[in-house]
Image (cartoon, rainbow, N blue to C red):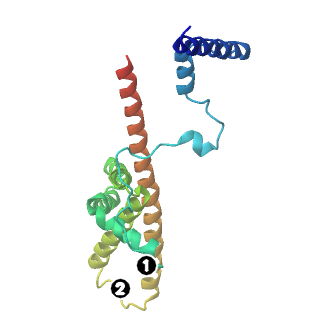
């Protein structure tokens, strides 16, 4: 008997022993069933309430690392990185910040009307869009859009109301400044939330589209 025949017989016996072990454990014997079992998604774990509402979404495919070309290594790296990212994609937050301010003015002018409700939807939609297009840091671009919108809005109100305050030291002026600071803080927070949600929606839609495309190719 040749060496090749002996090797083939040894491989056959090893395969038979492997199948016997799988059968004893109640596992499938054919390789296709094993592959299907390996590809089957794991049973969802019982996570937190937010995890069930917003399941984890993978990063966008084909996108480079946002800070891959960022060479600053000084002590202010986190702060400098913010301006670096915002400068890389100004169209992801500047137009939506202006749209947010416009929506605020329209919502105030059409309060308690259909126009006011539509304008509020435009406001939040602008923040979501900033996160959708700002894939590098969705929450950051949303926060920047909200802050920019507030700054533009505050400047507009300041110009319109110029001359109505008797003095910068008037108590009403101090109250207005405090209210403006609080409003700016909330605008930034809402922007960060809306931007995060916009980035999450984009990643989830990409994931669903990719899965559906693979399923169609397998048919």
Q: Which residue is label 2 attached to?
A: 165
- To which residue does mark 1 refer? 176
Count of numbered badges drawn on the protein = 2
Residue contact between numbered discs 1 and 2, judged by CB atoms under 8 Å: yes
Quadrant position of the N terminus in the picture: top right
Which SS class for mark 2?
A: loop
Q: In this view, which residue lies farthest toward the front?
A: 1
Instruction: Give how far apart the Cα atoms at labels 1 and 2 are.
Output: 10 Å
Mark 2 Cα within 10 Å, few/some/many (few <14, many 20+)? few
In this orientation, which residue lies closer to the viewer: 193 or 82?
82
Assign a secondary structure to mark 1.
Answer: helix
The x and y percentages for residue 75 are: 48, 79
Image quadrant where residue 134 sits: bottom left
Q: Report the front residue among 11 and 123.
A: 11
Q: Is residue 172 above or below residue 84?
A: below
In the rendered view, does 125 fall on the left or right side of 53? left
**Residue 27 in view in this figure:** no
Q: Is residue 179 left or right of residue 101?
A: right
Q: Nearer the viewer, residue 170 or 207?
A: 207
């Amino acid at each position: 008997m040749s060496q090749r025949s002996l090797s083939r017989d040894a491989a056959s016996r090893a395969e038979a022993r492997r199948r016997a072990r799988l059968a004893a454990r109640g596992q499938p014997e054919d390789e296709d069933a094993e592959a299907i079992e390996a590809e089957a998604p794991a049973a969802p774990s019982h996570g937190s309430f937010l995890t069930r509402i917003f399941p984890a979404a993978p990063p966008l495919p084909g996108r480079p690392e946002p800070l891959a070309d960022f060479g600053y290594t000084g002590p202010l790296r986190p702060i400098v990185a913010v301006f670096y990212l915002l400068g890389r994609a100004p169209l992801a937050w500047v137009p939506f910040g202006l749209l947010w301010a416009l929506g605020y003015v329209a919502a105030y002018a059409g309060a308690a009307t259909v126009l006011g409700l539509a304008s509020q939807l435009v406001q939040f939609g602008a923040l979501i869009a900033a996160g959708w297009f700002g894939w590098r840091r969705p929450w950051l671009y949303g926060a920047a859009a909200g802050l920019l919108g507030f700054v533009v809005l505050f400047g507009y109100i300041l110009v319109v109301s110029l001359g109505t305050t008797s003095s910068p030291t008037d108590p009403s002026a101090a109250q207005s400044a405090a209210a403006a600071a609080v409003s700016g803080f909330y605008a930034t927070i809402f922007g960060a939330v809306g931007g995060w949600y916009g980035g999450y929606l984009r990643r989830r839609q990409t994931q669903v589209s990719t899965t559906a495309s693979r399923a169609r190719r397998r048919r």
